[in-house]
Amino acid sequence: MISSPGVGAKNLAEIGPAERTTPAGRFVAKFGKALGRQRVLWVDYTNSVALHAVITTHKSEHRVERLLSPTPDDNRISFGCINVGTGFYTKKLRPLLQRKGGVVYILPDTKSLDEVFPRVRLLPYLTSLASE
């Protein structure tokens, strides 16, 4: 899935339900500032897709509970950003990526893995050829 064209230039109130997408793919991610001077890990800066700790401002959204549920059916809780648990974000992700950034893979949920990452299927063969 790709981001809706122009979605990164819109205010949140202008983004319709069909435009609230998270693109699948391989991204070079880097920390930077978002609105309100909050530091986030930008996955796709152009389309305003960031990875950050789950936002709990509106308790009625039950975001933490939804992330912890056993199925992904209720995990779509943002406008396209990737929300993760606060502990994971602050203790694992941020220390690992804050200095230089890193590569982030966003796996698809509407396409097969092969459609988004066609070489993954070939990796065992490519590795064996490289060692010959």
Image: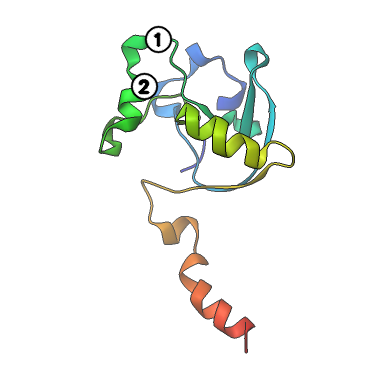
Q: Which residue is mark 1?
A: 58
Q: Which mark is residue 63?
A: 2
Residue 51 can be seen in this image: no
Query: Does label 2 or label 1 sit earlier along the sequence?
Result: 1
Front residue (pair 50, 66): 66
User: Colour scheme in the image?
Assistant: rainbow
Within-10-Å neighbours for mark 1: few <14, some 14–19, many 20+: few
| Position in image of residue 113 (x %, y %) | 42, 57
Residue under the image location 69 percent in, 36 percent down:
98
Front residue (pair 4, 55): 55
Q: Amino acid at mark 1?
A: His
Q: CA distance from mark 2 to mark 1?
A: 9 Å
Quarter where residue 40 is shown: top right
Q: Amino acid at mark 2?
A: Arg
Task: Judge from the rendering whether residue 123 lies leftward or rightward of residue 130; answer left or right.
Answer: left
Quarter where residue 50 is shown: top right
Which secondary structure lies at badge 2?
helix
Within-10-Å neighbours for mark 2: few <14, some 14–19, many 20+: many
